[in-house]
Image (cartoon, grey):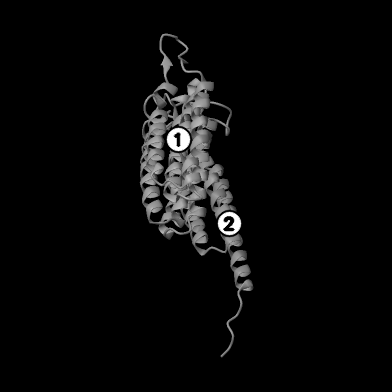
Amino acid sequence: MVLIDRKFDLPALGGFVLVGVAGITYRLGLDPGVALALARDYTDQNVDYVTPLLQIILAYLGGLCLLSLAGMQARLAREKTALVLESAAATIGAVFLSILIQRLLPTEMRDSHAGLGLLATVWAASCLNQLYRLQASGRFSRLLRSLLALIYGGVALLSILGLFVLSNPFLSSSERAVGPLILDSLAAAYLPLAVVFGIAAWQLHAFRRSVRAGCAVAASLLAAFYVALEIRRFWRGDDLSLPGVSDPELYSYTVAMLLAAAGLLILAFWRRSTALRKLAMAGVVLTIAKVFLLDMNGLSGLTRVFSFMGLGLALVGLAWLSRVMTAQWQKGETPAPEP
């Protein structure tokens, strides 16, 4: 239809294109769509999938190729039709990636925090991609992209809530960490999602500063939560829901907080950012409060003395680094011309 419209200039064919897009989206997304792609044979104890993976790949890749090629052709003459085709391709692509994640992950990771985190990553990336393209859009495309961003964002938000409430390894004993330390199911659940929000904080220039700051905060919290989980797994094993916190685990959190504060100071120096520098100093204050309120309760004698000495040396080093940064910034400033 798109090629015929382009050759003979028949705008009325755009309606048939929209009907075709609706049909492809319905068949691949709803009926049979995801239900058939994720159908399982519950008569087998191993819970094998009925639909062959190759058929699923051919079905979705075929639809994506047709939508993408039609969108490229329609872009030359029918901008609105091209936008609808492109939006349908983005939706089908997100659904296809979600299905691939569920099909390719090992059985023990498929329905746990790893699978849910990767699904949240796909839909969060789809939402933020629409927001990014919203920065240079016309009236119709702005309306359509806003609607898609709202839908994708809703699915991503539900997935993230499920990740932190239903599939949280801290809260559920069934959510055991799988795989080698660092490159494990915890990394699959939280690190890709943190990277997506970090890229959004870097690229969403046309939005308010608060939007970019919110994305940066989300990326930082996800990364910090992942580090905390890995530290707990190192000391406590694969079941992270065990009650209590051991002393070595508690001190490891303190070291990680000091390293994060030092990293923020270095980043602030590189970016010449006063806000990052203040955030690093806030991290130092929070670390000191944690040491005095939590860490020192379990120490006595020489152990407490040496711990105080180590903390003092670390704080002196951070203060020296901050002072060097200040001197370099003042040195690089251009003095104002005299009247």
174 relative to 157, above or below: above
Measured Cα–Cα span from mark 1 to mark 2: 39 Å
Q: Is residue 210 above or below residue 231?
A: below
Q: Residue 72 in the image: state x and y as whole percent.
A: 52, 44
Category of crowding for the residue at label 2, using alpha-carbon neighbours closer than 10 angstroms: few (below 14), some (14–19), many (at least 20): some
Q: Do we see residue 329 in this rendering?
A: yes
- In terms of image quadrants, where is residue 139? bottom left
What residue lies at 36% left-to-right and 34% top-to-bottom? Answer: 165
Q: Is residue 128 left or right of residue 315?
A: left
The nearer-to-camera label among 1 and 2 is 1
Q: Which mark is residue 166?
A: none
Screen quadrant of the N terminus: top left
Q: Can residue 232 be seen here?
A: no
- Nearest the viewer among 45 and 61 is 61
Q: Amino acid at mark 2?
A: Leu
From the top left corner, tell me how far across and down residue 38 is, in percent.
Answer: 43, 22
Kind of residue sitting beneath label 1: Ile
Quadrant assignment for the C terminus: bottom right
- Report the side of 295 relative to 30 (left or right): right
Q: Secondary structure at mark 1?
A: helix
Q: Residue at x 40, y 28 (%)?
A: 27
Q: Residue furthest front?
A: 8
Residue 154 position within the rendered picture, expressed as x and y whole percent measured from the top left: 35, 41
Nearest the viewer among 11 and 177 is: 11
Circle 2 residue: 267
Taking 134 as reference, is 332 above or below it?
below
Where 42 falls versus 199 (above or below)?
A: above
Residue corresponding to mark 1: 92
Q: Residue at x 55, y 30 (%)?
A: 184
Q: Quadrant of residue 243?
A: top left
Q: Based on the displayed image, in which of its 4 quarters is residue 111 positioned?
A: top left
| Residue at x 39%, y 53% (from the top left corner) | 142
